Image (cartoon, rainbow, N blue to C red):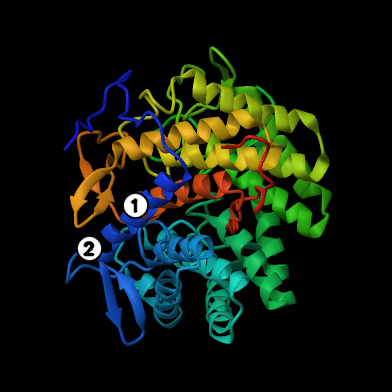
Amino acid sequence: MRDHTHAIGKPFASVPKAEAADFLEAVHKAHRYMEQFRVSDPDGFYWIDAPHADTDLGFENGAAGIAYFYLALYKTTQNTDYSRIAQEGFRYIRRHWRKQLRIQNPNAKYYELNVNSGVGSIASALLAYYEEAPDTESLTALREIAVYIADSAEQNNGDVSWTGLPYYAVGDAGIALLLLRLALALNDEKMHALAVASARTILKSQNPDPRGGKAWNIKPPGYPHNFPNFVIGTSGIGYAMSVFYEHTQDEAFLTSARSAADYLSAISVPQEEGTLVPLTDDPQERTFYLGACHGAGGTSKVFYQLYRMTGDERYKSEIEEMSKGILSLGAPEVQSSGYWNNTCLCCGTAAILQFHVAVYAAFGDRHYLDAAKRCARVLLGEAEDVGNDAIAWPLAETRLEPDKITLNKGYMHGAAGIASALLQVSQLLNGTFHWNRLVDDPYPTRCEPSPNAR
């Protein structure tokens, strides 16, 4: 096995040259790795690490994310074996989504419904599947989940909340936005009104920041400063507010989203080229995540949504500056303090790849595609042969434990997500890009290849 340890300035392994066919072949080999975890059940398929482990049906590391990957793989290859895996995965999820409520977690109140790994994440993936292949069974399951979410809301004098936290991934902003999307799919006015009421509740806790704009107070235990980025910070909450504006035309939501973007711009730190939003809003903070959870892949979403809705060029410019900032730190080939020995779709190389694919799809500038291809070559270089013509990616899931190397199968932290990133590059290079975005992603689902894209 190669050396997959972390050191600032250390280069990742990378292959010198690769084409669309090489990326697609790596995806097939990742599928062969995931196959060893698949369980066939009378109710469908699911994936499990060990015979007696809990069955995780969530998106982050469980069945929903893996089934979503197979849906994309089938769309790309038209291989009916992959279609069957996706269908059977979602069939099991439709029938057993309540199992996710029983996964033990000390913060169960925050865990059960969240759109990262809880029941909300299952609904997000199932909604994507339903949009691709509408069927009665999926619609029924989506209604069941929506009813559960609605019934779980706490209402007090017009305020609506589930967790009491405004976070996107594990808090009320993500749940509210998901409920909005479910209400639209189900044509349910009461759920729509509940979602909007919860979003208006979240608006009340946004406060002016002395440096500019407005932010939400997001200080996890042990941190004296706010987390500003997507997964739990102001950028994710602001993104949710921007989507509520799009569907309600309530100017209060647009004002909130603009103020959130102004705050993010105010705390951005110049790099040798471009700018980046740091991990916390401490003026002395110099840790810059380069992926999705606390990096540009997530933080850019509110800027792109605002650009898409308003046409204001400054929002486009902010996204361009984020890309420059990422590359100026040596990514994707070189590790840094916020880009450790991690290649996953949450906070590693695959996330940087997906961000640049998205921006290429949005703006069409060739250098974004070039950056994505560089990421893809790193992913090929970091892949390990695990036998039976299969590959996986050894990585450290968390920045604070860089010596804990694991081989993961899931979407956000393992092979399914990394393979999905490679699949996107392969689609682009073949001129067939079509990506079904989840509720947290405003970037284009399609793009026309630019001249000489290969």
Q: Is residue 159 above or below residue 405?
A: below
Callout 1 secondary element: helix
Image quarter of the C terminus = top right
Counting from the top left corner in percent of width and height, residue 107 is at: 36, 58
Counting from the top left corner in percent of width and height, residue 274 is at: 59, 19
* Residue at image coords 51%, 36%: 372
1 or 2: mark nearer the eye:
1
**Residue count near mark 1 (Cα–Cα under 10 Å), binned few <14, some 14–19, many ≥20:** many
**Residue count near mark 2 (Cα–Cα under 10 Å), binned few <14, some 14–19, many ≥20:** some
Observer able to see residue 275: yes
Q: Is residue 4 left or right of residue 229?
A: left
Location of residue 322 (image quadrant): top right
Location of residue 212 (image quadrant): top right
Counting from the top left corner in percent of width and height, residue 403 is at: 20, 34
- The amino acid sitting under disc 2 is Asp
Image quarter of the N terminus = top left
Q: CA distance from mark 1 to mark 2?
A: 13 Å
Q: Which residue is mark 1?
A: 415
- The amino acid sitting under disc 1 is Ala
The answer to which of marks 1 and 2 sits earlier in the sequence is 2
Location of residue 349 (image quadrant): top left
* Residue at image coords 54%, 12%: 272
Nearer to the camera, 322 or 285: 322
Nearer to the camera, 389 or 240: 389
Q: Which residue is mark 2?
A: 49
Q: Is residue 84 left or right of residue 182?
A: left
Callout 2 secondary element: loop
* Residue at image coords 43%, 28%: 332
Q: Is residue 5 left or right of residue 70?
A: left
Q: Is residue 107 left or right of residue 440?
A: left
Nearer to the camera, 143 or 359: 359
